Amino acid sequence: MSDSVYLYIALGVYFAAMLLIGYLAYRRTSGHEGYMLAGRGLPPWVAALSAGASDMSGWLIMGLPGAVYLAGLIEAWIAIGLTLGAYLNWLVVAPRLRAYTQVSRNSITLPSFFENRTRDKTRLLRIVSSVIILVFFTLYVSSGMVAGGVFFQSAFDGDYIWGMVLVTVVTLGYTLFGGFLGASLTDVVQGLMLVIAVVIVPVAAVVSVGGVGEAMSLVRDLDPSHFDLFGGTGLTSVTIIGVLSGLAWGLGYFGQPHIVVRFMALRTPQEAKSARRIGVTWQVISLAGAVFSGLVGVAYVSQNDIDLADPETIVLMMSQALLHPLVAGLVLAAVLAAIMSTFSSQLIVCSSALVEDLYKVVRKTPPSERSLVMLGRACVLAVAVVAALLAINPNDSILGLVSFAWAGFGASFGPIVLLSLYWRKLTNWGALAAMVVGSLTVFLWSAPEGGIFDLYELLPGFVFAGLAAIVVSLATYNRNEEIEDEFTATGTMLVVEKR
């Protein structure tokens, strides 16, 4: 049997498993809240692995190893920032958001929570946040489709369009019918595939080059600065800005709708603690494996005198060279898992924004549960179609929007999430101001020559948005007894759960 046959068998098994999980989730999904939030019934291990898998995308298995391969451990600051951000997100946001969204009129989306939490009667906060989600996530989903097409093009020398269509159809299949539960359960499998891939590939490469000592010696001989967290230049102003930019990625977690929605879907606020342990452990192992893959890749390429055209394919190249074709096929499937797990979650968030936060706002009479579920599926399909049309002609600016979208969500929503949970005086106008200031700062700072320093736009966007929220809220604050009661009830709910 040829190697290519093994590769296609592995991919076929993976696709079939995803569709089966989607069908099983479909059988267990009923009602609008079930479709959008799994009825707030996610076990902690599902929420943890799902949040991790939907977060990382193809960056974990391709982007990060490639960056470390080229520049060394100075690129690991992003991994450090993401690990710290994920830990704080689970510790500070997860339990309180789970409790508060239930107390505050059973909010099942982030925009609806913002509106209910601040008692925004203008509906502007809900509408503006929904539009931001739709714009960024439609392009985000499109970038995932492009990545799927490019993957088939480079890994199998296949046709870009057919690769994109295949990835889209399978992802759409389990998301369309399985809803949030289908996306979450498939994320669990995809998360496990990811962590296994970034562990077995560098281990196989280390064995191949003659052990850890030999691998590190080869890297050191080529470029000693690869082991320096400051790139061999010391604490210069440029290095400090680079480190801050890397660490700033962690701030983005607080405002990512497709991640924090997992917190809202937990069975109880108390289970955030065990979910945190599982999720952070998964993240540490995955990120460490990805960083180590990049380092040992330098040794493997050097020892075997390989001409590597694209550094981001280092893990794929080593897997195909060192592992059995069937196992290598599963590693390739893990790349698709990284891509698909992210944009399936984003499809659900887009659908909830359309149905829960826009359709229900403009419709005067409440629709039936069955109508809402059918409309939710229709919106998933509609967003996918628009994203696919954008992806037909791949454009680097769409792929580049991934980091921009992370900054946009982090700056626009992150400060509001934190303040809404821990500060009684946040008002709807303060939240709206933060959203506008955060979005504009990210946009202007990322524009050509827009930033004062070469600093990741998320950091200034987050800071300015937080200041805007505080200043405007203090200027527009009027005590509201309902808000006060909900704030107190949330704290009470957390205390009761701890007992």
Image (cartoon, rainbow, N blue to C red):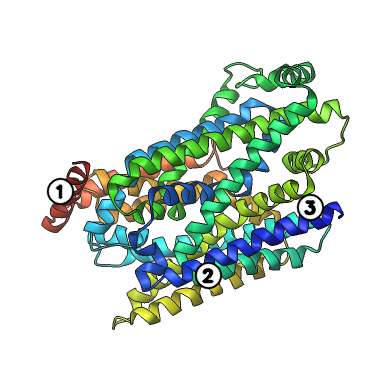
- The residue where tag 3 is placed is 155
Q: Position of residue 346 (x, y in %)?
A: 51, 60
Q: Where 137 falls versus 357 (above or below)?
A: above
Toward the viewer: 359 or 342?
Answer: 342
Give the amino acid at mark 1. Answer: Thr
SS at circle 1: helix
Label 3 crowd bin: few (<14), some (14–19), many (20+), radius 10 Å: few
Q: Position of residue 102 (x, y in %)?
A: 25, 58
Viewer-nearest of discs 1 and 2: 2
Give the Cα separation between the discs numbered 1 and 2.
Answer: 41 Å
Choose top left, top right, bottom left or bottom right for residue 86.
Answer: top left
Q: Which mark is residue 240?
A: none
Q: Position of residue 189 (x, y in %)?
A: 55, 52
Tell me the residue at 70%/21% (across/down). Answer: 212
Tell me, yes or no, whether the two marked residues, 1 and 2, touch with CB atoms within 8 Å.
Answer: no
Tell me the residue at 64%/69% (across/down). Answer: 169
Give the amino acid at mark 2. Answer: Tyr
Toward the viewer: 373 or 84?
Answer: 373
Tell me the residue at 54%/24% (across/down). Answer: 240
Q: Is residue 185 left or right of residue 30?
A: right
- The residue where tag 2 is placed is 23
Q: Is residue 360 left or right of residue 313?
A: left
Toward the viewer: 260 or 43?
Answer: 43
SS at circle 3: helix
- The residue where tag 1 is placed is 488
Image quadrant where one finds the N terminus: bottom right
Label 2 crowd bin: few (<14), some (14–19), many (20+), radius 10 Å: some
